[in-house]
Every structure is written in structure tokens, then in C-alpha cells.
Image (cartoon, coloured by chain):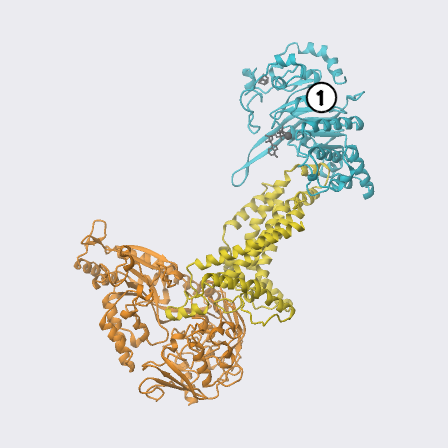
Amino acid sequence: MKKIGFLMAATALVAAGSAHAESHEGRATDGHLNIIYWQAPSLLNPYLSGGTKELEASSLVIEPLARYDETGTMVPFLVDEIPTVDNGGVSEDLTTITWTLSEGIKWSDGTPLTAADAVFTWQYCTDPESGCAQLSNYNDVESVEAVDDRTIKITFSVPKPFPYGPFVGAQSPIIQAAQFADCLGAAAPTCTDANFAPIGTGPFVVTDFKANDVASFVANENYRDPMKPAFATLNLKGGGDAASAARSVLETGEFDYAWNLQVEPEILNQMAAAGQGTVVSAFGTSVERMHVNQTDPDPELGDERATVAHPHPFLTDPNVSRALSLAIDREILVEAGYGSSGQPTCNVLPAPAIYASTNNDWCLNYDPDEANRLLDEAGWVMGDDGVRTKDGERLSILYQTSTNSVRQGTQALVKQMWEEIGVETELRNIDGSVFFGGDPSSPDTFQKFFADIEMYTNNFDGTDPERYMGNWACAEIPSPETQWQGSNMQRFCSEEYDALVVEFGQTAALEDRAALAIKMNDMLMNSGSIIPLVHRGGVSAHSNTLEGVLMNEWDSELWNIADWTRAE
Amino acid sequence: MFAFTIRRLLFAIPTLLAISFIIFAILDLAPSDPTGNLPLTISPEVRAQIRSSLGLDEPFPIRYLLWLKQFFINEPLNLIEGWTGWTLGDGERMRVTSWATRSPVVDLIIERMPQTLWVVGMSQVIAIVIAVPIGVISAYKQYSWFDQIGTFVSMVGFSIPTFFTGLVFIVLFSVHLQWFPSIYDTNHVIDSWDSFVFQIKQMIMPTMVLALATAAQLSRYMRASMLDNLQQDYVRTARAKGLTERVVVMIHVLRNSMIPVVTVIALNIPTIFGGAIITEQIFRVNGIGQLLIIGIQGADIPLVQTLTFIFAVLIVLFNLIADVLYGILDPRIRYE
Amino acid sequence: MSEMAPIKPLVEVRDLTMHFDIHAGILRRKVGAVKAVDGLSFDIMEGETLGLVGESGCGKSTTGRAILRLYDPTAGSVRIGGVDVASLGSADLRRARPQMQMIFQDPQASLNPRMTVGSIIAEPLREHSDMDRAARDVRVRELMDAVGLNRAFASRYPHEFSGGQRQRIGIARALALNPRFIVCDEPIAALDVSIQAQVVNLLEDLQRDLGLTYLFISHDLSMVRHLANRVAVMYLGKIVELAPRDALYSDPRHPYTEALLSAVPVADPVVEATRQQIILQGDVPSPANPPKGCNFCTRCPKVMPVCHEVSPVFVEHMPGRFAACHLIDEEKDASVLRENKNDNVQQGETQ
Ligand SMILES: Nc1ncnc2c1ncn2[C@@H]1O[C@H](COP(=O)(O)OP(=O)(O)OP(=O)(O)O)[C@@H](O)[C@H]1O
Ligand code: SF4
Ligand SMILES: [Mg+2]
């Protein structure tokens, strides 16, 4: 069993083109690796911080049972195979999943990894007082049991067609029970040492951690593959901004790998021209999209402003929304703001490939004539001042987003494009911490949505879209009754859609789930309540002397760091 | 002077308490949320739990009193324990803990002192070393080419922001010439001549960027103060006494001109501890300035509160020191 | 004042000119010059007190400072005891300094606030004599006694003294090196009236005891009348009239002197009652941009067309009496007067 798992991983690597992976001579033979994360990790316990930087940094040390590879496929890490209904690992009624740990896996302190550690991890995160940021991975988990030292049985309270929430992916690694035993619940924040230097099963061990600054690692002597990792030591430095992080890899060559290079595409290309390094990107599920308010945000409505009691005067008409979408030249938005980290998209669910619809691709074709025609047809008459009107109502839109130079650039471009079809646009941007802050007393949150259109990016963790597609159920509409909580920002509500959400929760076969997801995506697109703009990817850069990097948006970017090597 | 100092220190206590309350209140009113920067994939319920685990559910006065206790009682006790090795009480004191790192704020600050002092502190020293002679010569040779160039350079130093000079330095010295690293290694240990050289190398750019900005300002003070004094009758007296020009300028004029400059320098010292946010970011010195900005961005209120309060203490303290220095340097000033 | 005043000049000033450059613009280029002192020539006799009067800003202090080489004069020469201090190199100049000293208008500003009185007075001794510390202390005490300061105050700072005491410190400091010539730049202007007399008396006593020569700068005409043997009147950077005291006060020749004197109250009530004050119209022109012709032509009550064109020459129109005015050039009887009054004038100094 173990050998098979091994073979699988090795084949995946070779197939991915890292032919040099085999060339290094063994563990800790390739010297030092310098990584820069311009947003530095503030601790290495992802359960106490939901931030990506902490997730990624901790993935050097602590590991889940299985990770997602660069294609979004699950690969076993601490186990030999992924449990499925077919291999008997998942019960027929979809309520239990049983994982078997690989033999002989040790923590970096030399003690064996056991099922009890997984049980502890579950208890740690689900303790109501701990404020665990990754709680959603343990949704509906009724119990986690250690059947024996190597067997972990997870029981769900409801059938789980996709039972890979707990212990899969960077969000849900296993921590050592012995180290965190005194850190349960309210005591979690007091364990500074453990949070800064968790003991893990991963390829590296923390030697020094300076919060928000730099973390140092050495190769884990007890790592399960005696030949890996190739690097003896590793520094993960943080601070500064994305552009200078890019420069340190692409121009000065001081660093080997830089993460999350949200830099103007033009600048990044210039730096890459220096020839020291390579820019890599990967696409996950992030989509920059517009939500089209289906309710009326008119301030005169008072307490009922932006609630379902008052449908939007014109944006509920799918043809208006379609015209707005057709009038946007997405290629230009990508070129101006995203470069290699963006692709035009017409779907709110763009990936993984099996879930991606092709039925909405009309939107890729920038067509202002068609947009004009649609508006004419809908009765919007072009006025003398270039703005369309209908029954005395002007086609005027308040368009809001968070403060961010790329977003303001996009706003400006879209405003121009819409002007051409007679739509008046007023722009507004709100500081991100307020906009996304969710404070029910602030009028400027994205949940309150006191505007006609709002734009931001959202995505989902892992590869399964079930929860993500559930975002647009009627019950998810933010309203005064829910203290303005909820994820259905545009207030889309359809019984048919709600029924599909329920059906999704009961469907196990992957193909059926894919068909459902596509159907739901298309419903949303046809309603006109979401206008997808750009499928956004992660952009990183690595030195040309670094080999084995497989950019991954489904898991930590450092997911396969054990296989990274230094070119001769 | 002693009585004056004690009296001022006593007055400082209520002032600082009021400041701490105001800082706390402002931070509390600010619309920031420690979970605001988390990915949108984290649900509102989880966010609520995180907030409550950070103690944000407690009412404002309780949180303030708790902070007071942690900062004024627990932290000092902890420091004393650390210095003396005694055990005071049960040792299970709740310290001021940062939300983002779950680490005691004071430990984070101490961790960042070395690079802050090395880079920002050294930049002040260099700034003084550069600024004083330039100011003296500029004033002495007012309107000479030296003065004109000095004026021009300090105008440039004033008006060009450090992020720009920093960038220019990096492009020039790191990218093209490859002389100095563009990223400061806070883990670097000096244990040999070579490692000392490396430390100097990695300090040069951030230190110079800061020093230039400070020197520009300081040399103007120095020049103005020198000019002021050069026109005084006592300088004529000194010349009339037949002293050499060197004695006249260096002993009589410079000493008197240093009085205001020294106080400016003293008042500047808290900003050393405050770090240099922008320069630290550019060169990743990751000192106290960067700690503060990260705290602000992440709505890490205990961290921001504690840092801001420490700055307030330093500012009050160095104001007092400046006053006392003034009293010592200038015999005309007497504090009763 | 002294019984046998020698007629030998101690200080000979020739064509003394002091222009301050005016800089402007971003590059602070020279755009002009303030002609603070513009071609002065006069002598100061050994042992005499020459009064220098004029309105504020006319260049009195600049004259005093230029004579003592506290400024580098733009042009001209200043011979003190036969040595041209205006052209001495810095080392020689320092050696020449002891013989010429200055007492300043503002006693507070002229004393280094960070030095004790003792060290202020002792500093020139340290520089110019090889006295040891003890000897210097003795000399400091001597000097403090001489100017009437309590010697116990040597370790105090200047700000701890009253204005009059400070001026005494300034005087003691000036006397430290046994100077022959002292420029007193309005030494009493900043003092209370009651103290003014004390300081003036002190200066007179010292002059008598030490045989000092004074250039006494003041805008207080009565004080100058009391102190000076001869008086020079300055207007806009130039001396317009120079004459023995009594001659000048009783018979001013230059229209500006006339105007100045007409403003001074006279003790005699009868004369005071008939005193005709000449009110000058207009403002003093800027020394950076003096008028063409006579400097005084913009305000002179007796102005003539020629005054706007030609600058009058500073001439000795009568023996010992100098003035610069076209009116005086025209005085046909100047030669007669000169012959008659020659002796009187010269004697006049020696009372
Ligand atoms: N260092 C200097 N630079 C430029 N101009 C100067 C300087 N010193 C004096 N002046 C100018 O020269 C002129 C004469 O100044 P000075 O001080 O000699 O006048 P004063 O007759 O002594 O006046 P007061 O009675 O007010 O002391 C004034 O117009 C003054 O502004
Ligand atoms: S020259 Fe002319 S203007 Fe000048 S003082 Fe004599 S009369 Fe007056
Ligand atoms: Mg004067």
C-alpha cells in the first residue's frame, strides 16, 4: 500500500514535467532556500488565523491527510489512499469516512503520528471557546474516533456526498496532541511557543519564528521520505510590498520564490525580462464579479432599503443586466489590471474544469451594438444628454467596490464602456476593512449593498462547490432580520435554485454533481444577478535555479516543497 | 531642576492615563475588524466566534480596565520576574496579547528592538554627523556655493519621500551594481568580521535613506541656529577679543547654536523607537514601524494600543528630557 | 579733557566703504548692495572722544565695526597707531586686536550667555598673554574692581546681572588687554536713565586714567555734547559734517546738522521757547538705493537743482571743520573765515 502511494506521488511529479526532481542527491543536499511572502505570517497555526499567509507558511510544517495537487486532484499525503465509496472508505449512506494513516509516519520530534492526533485536532478546532478560523472544515462532523492507532473514523450527522472537509487541504492540517494538549479552548492563544513553532510531519521544522517578519526552518530529519527535502535550510521572509518582493526574485536574485505578486502586469513583465526568474500563475476558483442588486437601494425606503420588499426598479430585468455585461470588454480589463493573473470569464463557478459551464460564453464577445439593441428593446430611450430613460427613470447606476487601485481602474474603464450604451454610472469605493468588515452598524458593507452594483472577488476553498453554490439560496439574503449577515449579496431568490441546492447536498456521484453545479451556475448567469468579469489566479515567481515548483491554487503553493530542488 | 523633573513626572501620570483612554476609545470607535482581512470563505459565524475568543464581546470599560491591568501591573511584574528570576504571585498573569500573533505584545516589541535601533537609531546618529558640519559651514559661508548646494540638497531631501529614495537606491545599488542586499536579514548574527561587514552592508541603504531625510531637516535647523548666533554681538565680542576664527565659530557660536538643535534631536528620539514605517517596509527591516502598520492593517487592537501608548510615553518623556537638557545647556533657563 | 591733548591722530580713516551685498532669487545671486558706509575719511586724535551721531540706520555701527575690522571693509584704509588694520592678514590682525576694542549697545547680547563673567573677561588674556591661571584671576578681579563690579560675581552668568552691571562687564572685558582705542557703540542706549550717567562717568574716568581714545557712537545729541571733543554727523552712509563740538552745536553748517540740532531741547527756557524745529519731510532713502547727487537732497529744506545732479565733496571749509554741501562750496568768504577762526577752532578742542 505504501509503495503504491509513493509511486502515485512520484508519477504525478514526473508527469508534471519536473524531470530534475530525481537529480538531487538526497535530503538536505541543496543548501538554503529563500522564500519571500510580502505579507509575513503572524503565526504558524492556521486554526488561529484564517489568513492565506499563515496557511501557506504552516504547510511547510504541518500536513493534512491529503492535499490537492495543481490540477485540483486529491493526492494522499499521510495516508496511502483516498477513501471513496468504491474502495469502502466512505460508507454507502455517506455518513462516515475512514482514513488509514500510512505506516511509520513520525512527527519531527520522533514520536509516531497516530489517529489520536487527528481526534485531538478536531477537538481543538471545534472547542467553542477557541475561535477556530477553520471551523467550517468540520461542519456536520459528529465525531472523530481513533479506531486504532492508524485508523481515523469520521462520522457526520448528515449524509456527506463530499466528505473531504476534515483533514484535507491546507486549511485542515493535523496538529500534535502532545504539543497542544494544554491549549484547548480559551487557552489556545496562550500557547505562543506552540503557535509559533508547531511540531509537524512535513518536510521542514521551525527553528526560529519572528512574527510578521521571518521564519527559519531546517529539513525534518524524520520526514517520511528519506531523500527529501532537498534543501537543508529555509528562510521565509516577510514585509514590504508585492512589487519589491517580485524584484527580489526577478531582478536582484536575492530570493528564490516570491508569493502573491499582485503587481501591475506591465511592471511584472519588465522585471521578468531581467531573466533571473520566471513568473508562474495558477487559477483556482476566484472570480472578480459584479453583483447586481435585485432590491431597491433607494435611501427613501428607510429601514426597508435594499430588502426584498422592494425589487430594484430596473436591474431585475435580465436584459438590462445582459446589456451591461455585453458592453464590458473583459479583455481590456484583464490587460489593464491583471495580466497573467486574469482571464475573462462568464461564469461565477469557473473551475475545476468539470464544473465549468460553457453555456454563457456569449459574454466573452464584447458587443456594444447588441447591448444597445437590448436596451432599446427593453424600452430605454436614449436621451439628449446621452443617458437612457424609461418612464421618467434615468438609467443611472451607483457602482461600488473596495478601495484598491486595480478595482478603481476597472471601475473607470467600465464607466466609460457603459457610457457608450447610455448608462450613467456613479463610482464609489469603500475601504476594504469597512466594506468587507460586516459591521451591521455601518451602511457601507457589501452585505448591506446600498448601491446598484458592487464588485469584488470571491472563491471557495478546495475543489467542491457545494457550499459555494449554496451562497445564493433565498435564506442567505442579508436583511435586517439576519443582522445583515448572509452571502446572497445580490438578493437572488428562486425556488427552483433552492431546490437544486438541496439536491446537491444529496448527490454523491461526481458527474451528477458537476451537472448540477453547471445548471446552478447557468441559472445565476441567466438571472442577470451576477456579471462575472475576470477569473483570477495566483501569481508567483521563482528563480530560474529553483526547480520543482508546481503552482497550485487548490492548496498551499508550497504543497510540494519537499520536491523542490536547486538546478545544477 | 530635580524638583522640577519630579513635578513634571508626576504631572505626566494623569496626562498619560488620559492619553491611554483616548487612544483606546479612538481605536474602539474606528471601524476596523480583526476578522476583516480574512478570506471571504470564512463564514460570519466563525468570524463571530473568533471575535468573541478575542474578548471583543466584553463592554468597552471592561476591556479598557483589563488592558490597564495587563499593561500597568502584569507586564511590569513580568519584566521584574524576567530580570530577577523571582516568582511573583502565581505567574499565570494574562499579558497584553496581540490578536494576530497570539503572542505577548511586549515580546514582539523586544524582538524588533535590535533592527529598529540599528537602522533607525544609526540613521539618526549619521544624520547628526552629516547635518551639524553642513549646517555650520552653510551658515558660516552663507550664500557661498557650498551653502547653495547644501540648500538644494536639503530641499531635495525634504521633498523627496523616502519610498522614492529607497526605490532609487535599490534599483541602483541592488539591481544594477549588486553592492548591497535590498532585503534586510533580521536573523543575521554578528560573530565575525565578515558578518559585521555584511551587517554594515545591509544597513547602509535603509540607514542612508533615513539619514538623508533627517539630515536635510537637521542641517536646516543647524544652519538657522548658527546664522542666528553668528549675527549676535557676542560673536563680535569674541572676534574683538582677537580669538581665532576657529575658536569663535567652534566654541562660541557652535556651542550656543547647539542648544536648540540638541532639543530638536532629543524630541526626535521617540521617532526612532517609533521606527520608520515606510523605509522599514521598503527594505524589510521589519522593525517597530512595520509592527505598527501591520497591527493597524490587521486591526490588532492590543498591539496598536500598546505601541501607540508607548510612543506617547516616550514623547512625554523626551519632551521632559529636552526641557531638562535645555536647562542644563542654557544657563539662562532655570526651572524652580 | 586731558590737559595737554596731543594733536597727533591715533586713528586715520580714509575712504572707508562698507557695502553689504544683497542676494535674491533661488540661487541667491547678488542683485545689489546696501551702501551702509560709503567713503568716509576722518581722523581721531589721540586721547580725544569723537562723537558719531545720526539717525538710526545711517551706518554708525557699521562704521565702528569696519574700523575695528569686525567687518572686512569693501574699500578704504583704517590706520590705527600707524598700522592699516583694514588690510592686515588674519594672524597679524589678531595680534593687533588688543589695542582696539569695542563696547556694544546691547550688553546682554554682546556677552556669550554660556560663559561665566570670569571667563568672559579672562578669555582675551588667555589668548593674548602668557599669564597663568592665577595671574589671570588677579587681573580679572582688578578689572572688575576698576569697573565697579563685585569681584565675587566672577562665576556668575551674564543673565544674572542687571543691565548696568552687564555693561560694566562689557567694559571690563574691553579693557582687559589695555587697549588704546575703544569704539563705544551706543553703550548707554539700552540702559535706564539713572544708570546711563554712572556708565558715562565710568567711561570718562577710565579715559582720564588710562588715556583712552574713544569713538563714541550715539544718537543722543546731548550725551555726545557732554562727552565728545569733536562730533561727526552721519547721514545715509556718509559723514555730512565734522567739527569741534562747540562749533558744531552753536553753528551747524550742514542743513542736516541744523535739522538734527533743531530737534534737541535746550536747557535754557528762553532759547527753548524760541527754538524753531526744522521738520524733515519724507523718509530716509534706502542705503541700497541712495539718490543721485547729494544723499540728503530728497529731504533737504535748502535743496538746489545742482544737489540732484552732483554729489557734494566733503571738504575742510574752515580749519578743523568739514562738511559736504553745495551751499558751503558756494560760501565765498570761506577763506576769510578760515584765517580768522583757524586758531579758535583748534584751540576749541582743548578747552
Ligand atoms: N550685515 C548686514 N547686512 C546687510 N545690511 C546691513 C548689515 N548690517 C547693517 N546693514 C544695513 O546697513 C545700514 C546701516 O546699519 P547700521 O547698523 O550701521 O546703522 P546704525 O546707524 O548703527 O543704526 P542704529 O542707530 O539703529 O544702530 C542699515 O540700513 C542696515 O540695514
Ligand atoms: S548739497 Fe544740497 S541737498 Fe545736500 S545738504 Fe547741501 S543743500 Fe541740501
Ligand atoms: Mg547701531
Q: Amino acid at mark 1?
A: His
Q: Where's residue B218, x and y in %?
A: 58, 49
Residue A278 visible in this rendered orientation of the protein: no
In the image, residue A298 above or below residue A148: above
Q: Where's residue A203, x and y in %?
A: 49, 79
User: Mark 1: is the Cβ under 8 angstroms from ligand 1?
Assistant: no
Name the quadrant where ligand 1 sits. Answer: top right
Residue annotated with mark 1: C226
Chain in cyan (letter): C
- Colour applied to chain B: yellow
Q: Answer left or right for A111 relative to A464.
A: right
* Quarter assignment of residue A340: bottom left
Q: Nearer the viewer, residue C29 or C342?
A: C342
Residue B306 visible in this rendered orientation of the protein: yes
Give the quadrant of the N terminus of chain A.
Answer: bottom left
Q: Element type at marker 1?
A: helix
- Colour applied to chain A: orange
Q: Answer left or right for A326 relative to C51.
A: left
In the image, residue C144 above or below residue C215: below
* Quarter assignment of residue A96: bottom left
